[in-house]
Amino acid sequence: MSDVVLRVTHLNGGYARHTVLRDLSFELRAGEILALLGPNGAGKTTTLMTVSGFLPAISGSVEVLGHPAHRHSPHQLARYGLGYVPDDRALFTSLSVRENLKVARHGGGTLDLALDYFPELRKRLDVKAGSLSGGEQQMLVIARALVGRPKILMIDELSMGLAPAIVAKVLPVLRRISDELNTAIVLVEQHVQQALAIADHAIVLVHGDVRVSAPGDVLRGDPDQLERAYLGQSVDPALTVDSQDVPA
């Protein structure tokens, strides 16, 4: 379908000859949110880094906005419309909030567009990023990505180091971004139930293998199956059959 913005097909990924991600396939359409879940070491960050071009795929393929990812650098994929928010935030801590936002102006977005989603930052525009709270820094890194007006936004561990109340405040903003800007989002998140509350679809990875792939609301309503997936136990086959593709 024409609105597929990200297609991952039988992807195997890892580092050198060490495979940590096996046979992952899914399709993501504009305006959808995919929650990528699983315990530490499951292959979630490897997935984001491979899709974003920072790691070469061992085998399989990734197509970003119609472009084969292996033929393009991360910088080129960003120009096409792929935004990546790493788990270490990668802010310029000695620069102000305003300056951090300005360095991302390349995709047609504006500072006002980003700040509309995170109005708390308007009062902190002249404050150095290194002086912000953890929650404000996370808002800034997402706002900075929005300035580039991405068509796909990859977010790794949004909640790392944040209080649950801050996570509960920021995650619904991602749903708004997806709905209002028609942005596809792949979200790696450890606050599982909160991630499922905003996700159209979810994939649970365990030791690099897909254990569950199902609509977000289905998994949210079946915590027992979710727990079994995390523990590597057998799950309802209905949660894995014909579910490698995110449905329209």
Image (cartoon, grey):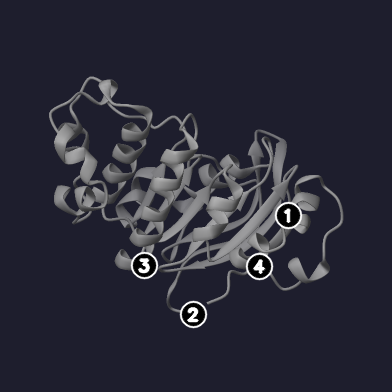
What is the spatial separation of the Cα atoms under label 4 and label 1, in whole angstroms? 10 Å
Q: Which residue is mark 4?
A: 218
Q: Position of residue 184 (x, y in %)?
A: 42, 62
N-term-proximal mark, 4 vs 3 = 3
Q: Which residue is mark 1?
A: 226
Task: Give the residue at the far front of this rendering.
Answer: 165
Task: Give the residue at the far right of this rendering.
Answer: 234
Left or right: residue 195 compared with residue 230: left
Along the line of sight, the residue nearer the viewer: 145 or 198: 198
Q: Position of residue 16 (x, y in %)?
A: 65, 33
Nearest-to-viewer mark from 4 and 3: 4
Tell me the kind of residue under disc 1: Leu
N-term-proximal mark, 1 vs 2 = 2
- Label 4 environment density (alpha carbons within 10 Å; few <14, some 14–19, many ≥20): some
Q: Which mark is residue 179?
A: 3
Q: Which mark is residue 1?
A: 2
Q: Position of residue 106 (x, y in %)?
A: 20, 49
Is 37 situated above or below 242? above
Is 120 situated above or below 217? above
